[in-house]
Amino acid sequence: MEEEEEDDDDLREDDDFENDNASNIANVGSSFPLVVDEKEDVQRTITEIKKQMEIADVGLAILMSESEKLESLAHGMEEERCMAATTHDCDDDDEEDASSSSCSSGEKGEKEYAYGLPEESLEVVEHFLQEETLGCMSTNGKGTIFLSQNGHAAYTSHIPKALRNILQQRQTSLPTPIYVSIGTKARFYVEFEDGKAEWYGPEKLSDCLEVNADLDISSVAFGKLWDTFFVVFSDGSWEYHGKGLPRGLVRLVVEDRRRLSDLATVTLGPRGEWFVVAKNGRSWWGGLSDDLDNVISDVLDEADDEDGKERVVDFIDFGEKDSYFLIYE
């Protein structure tokens, strides 16, 4: 009898063991979907985060684009304010009479010059033209800079401060500057004998110069708005950017001349003035003040006393308050 009871107890223990195992298996089976669900939740979360990051990237790109537009607009409004000023220049402490410019000409070999610049600049200008052989020059009206053919630089006050610091702090043992261009809003471009260059201007200008780094620069011009510029490369090709580019210039290079890659130099002024020279020496200009238009008319009407040849305009640069520098022969 006792043995039968023991057998019954063993059977009950076996049943309990099987029940416990079945229960454990059931528990494992019921917990597995939970693990799967958690993985799916994590994957959905990662996917959602990636979507949010993509949206954020798009938003950032839009904000950067709007920032550039606002920057351009702000510079444009400031430029218009400066242009509208009649008694004071952009700097309140920088008074200058717009009518206190002077015009003269001087012969240096076959080249002659006519200029209308602030009176305070004339001493530097005339001394340089008498003592040096002009290699390159640029003016923004307030400031003027000259480079001689041997690399000597001479400049008046009010050229861009960053450019002045570069020239003043540059060691004499380093390559000398061979090309320079200055504009309003402290913009400038300067290049040295070793091909290295420094500049300050809109981001689009940096992009243009970097993309075309394998090409030598022939000229860089800054227009009336912050982001307006025109770059000519040594092979005659060119690029421009900015809403402030003169329509007459665009019509000439794009429509009339059908985008020919044969330009030598382009200059721009703060009031829509422009000047273009092709590699064959032919030149065009537009947007000039009445004063400069009359000066050029007088120059072209004159014939050379020795051989009777017509005068040719080689170069014009423009500055604020209808200032200019003209080279002809």
Image (tube, rainbow, N blue to C red):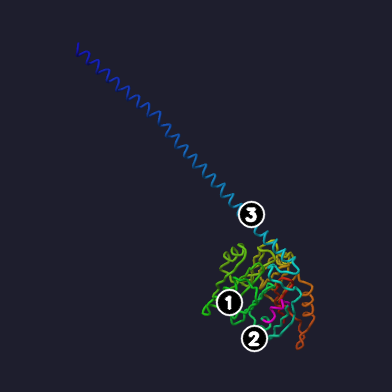
Residue type highlighted by circle 1: Pro
Residue type highlighted by circle 3: Glu
Residue matched to label 1: 177
- Label 2's element? helix
Q: Are marks 1 and 2 in contact (CB under 8 Å)?
A: no
Indicate which label's residue lies in the foreground, 1 or 2: 2
Residue 121 is a magenta residue: yes
- Quarter of the image for residue 146 reads bottom right
Say which mark, if any, is on residue 131. Answer: 2
Task: Name which of mark 2 and mark 3 comes first in the sequence.
Answer: 3
Q: x%, y% of residue 11?
A: 26, 17
Residue 159 seen anywhere in this rendered image of the structure: yes
Q: Which range of residues does the magenta coloring cover?
A: 116-123
Between the C-alphas of marks 1 and 2, the distance is 18 Å
The residue sitting at 27% across, 20% down in the picture is: 13
- Label 3's element? helix
Q: x%, y% of residue 9?
A: 25, 17
Task: Name which of mark 3 and mark 1 comes first in the sequence.
Answer: 3
Between the C-alphas of marks 3 and 1, the distance is 37 Å
Say which mark, if any, is on residue 66. Answer: 3
Nearer to me, 290 or 328: 290
Magenta span: helix, strand or loop, mainly? helix
Residue type highlighted by circle 2: Glu
